[in-house]
Amino acid sequence: MWEKSVGVTAESRTPQRERSAVFAAVGAHVPSIVVTNDDLAARLDTSDEWITSRTGIRTRQVVEPGGSTSDLAIAAGMAALRAAGSDASIDAVVLATSTPDRLVPATAPAVAAGLGLAGVPAFDVDAVCSGFVYGLAVANGLIAAATADRVLLIGADTFSTIVDPTDRATAPLFGDGAGAVVLRAGEPDEPGALLAFELGSDGALAELITVRDGWFAMQGQAVYRQAVTRMAGAARGVLARTGWEPGDVDSFVGHQANLRILRAVGADLGVDADRVHTNVTEVGNTVSASIPLALAHAHAAGRIRAGHRVLLSAFGGGATWGAATLVWPELS
Ligand code: UT7
């Protein structure tokens, strides 16, 4: 049996050491080259109508040739550190990515050094599109165990470097980007504290999303079905651990793979459509960056506000899935 789900709640931690990771700042960065559906239709057997109706995606942004995940991660990390203000002393950097600059070494140490944080522990986490939620759980663990007081967590990917530009089945789906959060030690019941997680994987589904001969490959319809089932299941699990009903959720930020998937998960859960946040239309599927980018964009636009009960849920290659909850804090 390959499958195992785990969950942790604030209550399950050692009572004498009640520390939670608390959101202190968010930041985002997308590269400047915009690729429209018409740009793709000019070189592939596809159309704006097909891409928009099947995925909701209208544009995506990609790095220049030679651009790397660390470039984007450093820019998003810098934005989050600036938003965190002058007391932003960071003592660990966690990078969620599936497109590291190199296979070895990990990319996080280079990102830390690029941010002027050489010396702090830095490492990569790879759970593909669930990577940011897994990263949140790892950062929460570092803080809860008092290994770190302030963690910079970045989700960054450059799938344009592994997607076959001649493959109409995958080329329209992905964009490059990075999103970052500063997490600080705080009280489990204060706004911004991570309240609960639900994480899982099933290695029997490894062939659904993979890289073959250097190019990304995906069994689209099977992934679609799994994404809806697993994202809704993980969301239900984390809501139960948090003690919330679906109707309590003010903001649902799911992994931004496909507008239809996000709407289906919202409907399956019973979360009102106007509480389902999306930016996949503008940025496509940015993999590990998807949830932090969506959070940063929704925060900047005032769509997620202080006091909102926020539900995060993701599904990705592995297969992996994960969900988390928090109450959105006052952030600059
Ligand atoms: O981040 C990891 C998670 N990823 C996802 O969640 C993605 C999940 N999957 C999906 O979002 C959808 O499966 C896709 C958007 C990838 C595809 O949509 P679909 O409705 O499942 O289409 P399909 O794969 O069943 O293909 C339908 C038809 C096929 O043609 P025939 O066999 O019916 O003649 C495809 O060849 O559409 C064709 N097709 C296209 N046509 C025009 C596939 N890609 C394209 C395209 N333009 N870009």
Image (cartoon, rainbow, N blue to C red):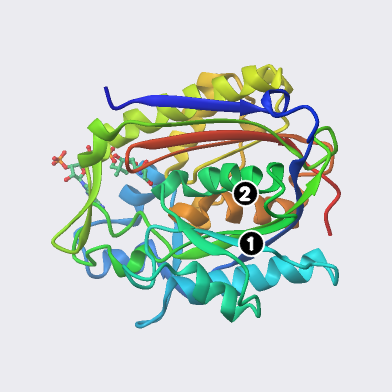
The front one of 177 and 7 is: 7
Callout 2 secondary element:
helix
Quarter of image, ligand 1: top left
Tell me where residue 192 sits by quadrant: top right
Q: Badge 2 local density, few (<14 within 10 Å), some, or many (20+)?
A: many
The x and y percentages for residue 331 are: 83, 54
Q: How many marks?
A: 2
On residue 276, the disc is none
Residue drawn at (26%, 40%), measured in percent from left and top? Answer: 220
The front one of 255 and 131 is: 131
On residue 139, the disc is 2
Look at mark 1 in the image and give the residue it sits on: 92
Left or right of 255 in this view: 9: right
Disc 1 residue type (three-letter): Ala
Residue drawn at (67%, 73%), measured in percent from left and top? Answer: 78
Left or right of 270 in this view: 182: right
Precedes in sequence: disc 2 or disc 1 = 1
Q: Quadrant of the N terminus?
A: top left
The x and y percentages for residue 293 are: 59, 56
Residues at circles 2 and 1 in contact by the CB criterion of under 8 Å: yes
Tell me where residue 244 sits by quadrant: top right
Residue lying furthest front in this view? 16
Disc 2 residue type (three-letter): Ala
Q: Badge 1 local density, few (<14 within 10 Å), some, or many (20+)?
A: many
Residue drawn at (78%, 66%), measured in percent from left and top? Answer: 83
The front one of 257 and 117 is: 117
Q: Quadrant of the C terminus?
A: bottom right
